[in-house]
Amino acid sequence: MAVDWFEGPREALAGLFELADDSPAAVSRYCELGRVLVARDGVTVIGHLQLIAGERAGEAEVKSLAVREDRQGAGVGRMLVERAVAVCRQEHRPTLLVATAAADTRVLGFYQRLGFRLLRVERDVFTPQAGYPAMEVDGIPLRDQVWLSLDLQG
């Protein structure tokens, strides 16, 4: 398996972006931003991580991360995040941010196991008005967004 920068049209990654975000409207707003790392098994893309500039100078943000469902749990997501961390450290960025659904405790645990720490909560981000269907994740209503950060200088 190899992780490298994606150079093709982002439409080729549409299935992964859709897997990462339940709002097609949201995906269309950000899918062309930043840079994208992809994990490949041979020539087949099995995962992606979109890295964009953060709100503050020097910060970076993991905007989108997804691994094909048939390859989840095999360390592909971890490899993508670890490569993004290495890139950000090489670029002397102080912080790497990520936002995810508060209801998705599996994803929250994933990022915390990689060293990310809870930063803040934004209420009512995942609403029908924002293009998200009313839904639950593991019995928890999908409403709020949790931001996590990783200190890259320590």
Image (cartoon, rainbow, N blue to C red):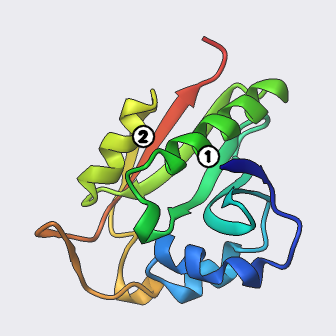
Given residues 17 and 149, the one toward you in this image is 17
User: Which residue sits at x=45%, y=88%?
Assistant: 131
Are the residues flagged by discs 1 and 2 in contact, CB closer than 8 Å?
no
Across the whole image, how many numbered discs are drawn on residues? 2
What crowding class fits label 2: few (fewer than 14 Cα within 10 Å), some (14-19), or many (20 or more)? Answer: many
**Residue 107 % position (x, y):** 35, 52
**Furthest-top residue in this view:** 154
Task: Give the alpha-carbon distance from disc 1 to disc 2, as whole Å.
Answer: 12 Å
- Relative vertical location of residue 124 with respect to residue 98 in this rendering, above or below: below
Judge depth for marks 1 and 2 and give the one in front.
1
User: Which residue sits at x=58%, y=82%?
Assistant: 15
**Residue 47 % position (x, y):** 59, 62
Mark 1 vs 2, N-terminal side: 1
Residue type marked 2: Tyr
**Furthest-left residue in this view:** 139
Residue identifier under label 2? 111
Given residues 69 and 20, the one toward you in this image is 69
Residue identifier under label 1? 80
In terms of image quadrants, where is residue 71?
Answer: bottom left
Given residues 42 and 6, the one toward you in this image is 42
Task: Judge from the rendering whether residue 49 lies leftward or rightward of residue 123; answer left or right.
Answer: right
Residue type marked 1: Leu
**Furthest-right residue in this view:** 7
- Relative vertical location of residue 5 with respect to residue 8 in this rendering, above or below: above
SS under mark 2: helix
What crowding class fits label 1: few (fewer than 14 Cα within 10 Å), some (14-19), or many (20 or more)? Answer: many
Task: Judge from the rendering whether residue 113 lies leftward or rightward of residue 56; answer left or right.
Answer: left
Q: Quadrant of the C terminus?
A: top right
User: Which residue sits at x=75%, y=67%?
Assistant: 43
In terms of image quadrants, where is residue 24?
Answer: bottom right
Q: What label does residue 105 carry, if any?
A: none
**Residue 142 % position (x, y):** 26, 71
